[in-house]
Image (cartoon, helix red, strand yellow):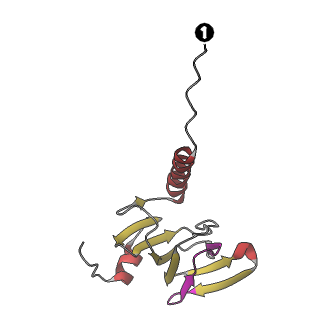
Amino acid sequence: MKPYVGHIEKETLDNANFRKVVFTGKYAQLVVMCIQPGDEIGNEMHKTVDQFFRIEKGEAKFVFENGKEDSVVKDGDAVIVPAGTWHNVINNSKKDVLKVYTIYSPPNHPADRVQKTKAEADAAEHAEEAEKAKAAKPAKPAPKKAKK
């Protein structure tokens, strides 16, 4: 595995995808995001993943624990969300995109994943959840043969 070396501010500002995985290591993952005006990542919680956010452009409202706490952050600010914390990131602007990069520890997405839109990301997450549920469901036992 090669190290990541790059100009993360430029990479974040140049990114037009909702989510783009830039680097995936054994214990951390770097992702750049572009959140459309008025849009959000959606309320989520990672049981075993800490998440660091850095705002490169725009203003965001971070909502924690289903609305019990929130913080407004802007260019240059950082937020760390500990594992097990419900959180949402909302683009406060009605006209400008929000550009952030985030570091998951450990990784949270497949390496090299690129999702152009939030709808594409949501569809992939629903498919992954359905696949996990299907895999977790015990197989039905074979019907017993009738005795003669």
- Along the viewing direction, whichever of 31 and 135 lies nearer the viewer: 135
Residue 24 placement, left or right of 83: left
Is 87 covered by the magenta stretch?
yes
Position in image of residue 23 (x %, y %) = 34, 72
Spot the residue most to the right. Answer: 68
Q: Please provide percent x and percent y for residue 77.
A: 53, 89
Q: Residue at x 52, y 78 (%)?
A: 50
Q: Secondary structure at mark 1?
A: loop
Comparing 147 with 1, the one in front is: 147
Residue marked by disc 1: 148
**Left or right relative to 108: residue 88:** right
Q: Position of residue 133 (x, y in %)?
A: 57, 48
Q: Amino acid at mark 1?
A: Lys
Q: Residue at x 61, y 15 (%)?
A: 146
- The magenta stretch is 74-91
38 relative to 122, above or below: below
Q: Is residue 95 above or below residue 78?
A: above
Q: Quadrant of the N terminus?
A: bottom left
Q: Is residue 28 above or below residue 17?
A: below
Residue at x 43%, y 70% (from the top left corner): 107
